[in-house]
Image (cartoon, rainbow, N blue to C red):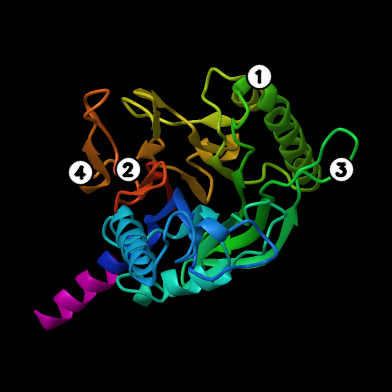
Amino acid sequence: MNKLIFIFFIFSSLFLQAQTDFRVAFYNVENLFDTHDNTQINDDEFTPEGTRHWSNYKYWQKIKKTSKTLKILGGWEAPSLIGLAEIENDTVLKHLIYSDPLRNSKYGIIHRDSPDHRGIDVTLLYRKDKFFPINHKFYPLLYDNGEIMHSREIVYTKGLITGGDTLHVFVIHFPSRYGGYKKSEPKRLNAVKQLMSITDSINRVFKDPNIVIMGDFNDTPINRSIINLDNNKWLNLLKCDHGTHKFQGQWNKLDHIFISNSLLQKDNKIYVNGYTNAFKEPFLFEEDLKYLGNKPFRTFVGFKYNGGFSDHLPVYIDLKIK
């Protein structure tokens, strides 16, 4: 009997290993700044003496709540890959991944300081038992004349999924709508053009590469930057009944995960299992007293400390590994 149980356990383990979930997630965490003044960037408001009165208590509450969100976002275990936006530096990232409940997930970090004037960056966190980075590169966004934008860089990582295949991962946070949509749109169109140029170069080198692009695009599916990506044969599988961000009572889908066609092929070593979903746990919401319904439970409302999580909802997609 013991021998039969042992054999059953071995076959069950092999089956589970043959169909492993690999969750990829993205989260704009809304201004995860430390409390120290960095004279190289415009972070004065996120200091104890600044306009937001950003104290150690508020900072560690933010770390705790972000860590909790990311852990629960993984379901049974923490996500295999996490793209993050609005991170100030590697110090806050280390505080985040070494805090409970993320501490035991053993994340590695792909990050560098970007030329963004506020000092906010994008980064990729990867579980060391799930993903092995081969190389990575940071691409600053450019204007038509080649001048570097004071914005977040495109973070690119090529790596091996444990038990799977090669995966190319992009994390982005495109220029905001500050100054108005029409005035700011050319920056996002330039960013998408540059992103497509980079992915085209990957397609020229690799046959049917597995590519994931995730981030805060600051545009919705009806805007030209997203339409241009769709027309470039990228697949946006976002499925949610509202959006990922709410502004003046209007929900918008600003956070997306795009995949290459190869990840739809179930005979591939890795393939998509389902749609991209917005993570909608009740603790991430609060009542919208002005516009009715609910809204993301954010850290700040204007300059008033609100004590919440973020003004965006996380998004995620599951890959299956044979």
Mark 3 residue type:
Glu
Say which of marks 4 and 2 sits in front: 4
Q: Mark 2 points at which residue?
A: 279
Label located before the other in sequence (4 or 1): 1
Quadrant of image for the C terminus: bottom left
What secondary structure is marked by label 2? loop
Mark nearer the N terminus (1 vs 2): 1
Which of the two labelled residues, at mark 3 and mark 4, occupies the earlier sequence position? 3
Q: Earlier in the sequence, mark 1 or mark 3?
A: 3
Find out whether the residues at labels 3 and 4 contact each other: C-beta distance under 8 Å. no
State the image coordinates of residue 200 (x, y, percent, origin top left). 77, 38
**Residue where numbered disc 4 is placed:** 282
Tag 4 and tag 2, C-beta contact below 8 Å: no
Q: Are marks 1 and 2 in contact (CB under 8 Å)?
A: no
Task: Indicate left or right for 301 with 128 as reference.
Answer: left
Label 4 and label 2: CA atoms lie apart by 10 Å
**Inter-mark Cα distance, 3 to 2:** 37 Å
Q: Distance between the residues labelled 1 and 2?
A: 30 Å
> What kind of residue is marked 4?
Pro
Above or below, 123 relative to 7: above
Residue 282 counted in the magenta span: no
Residue 147, disc: 3
User: Which residue is the site of mark 1?
Assistant: 182
Crowding near the residue tagged with mark 1, few <14, some 14–19, many ≥20 C-alpha atoms within 10 Å: few
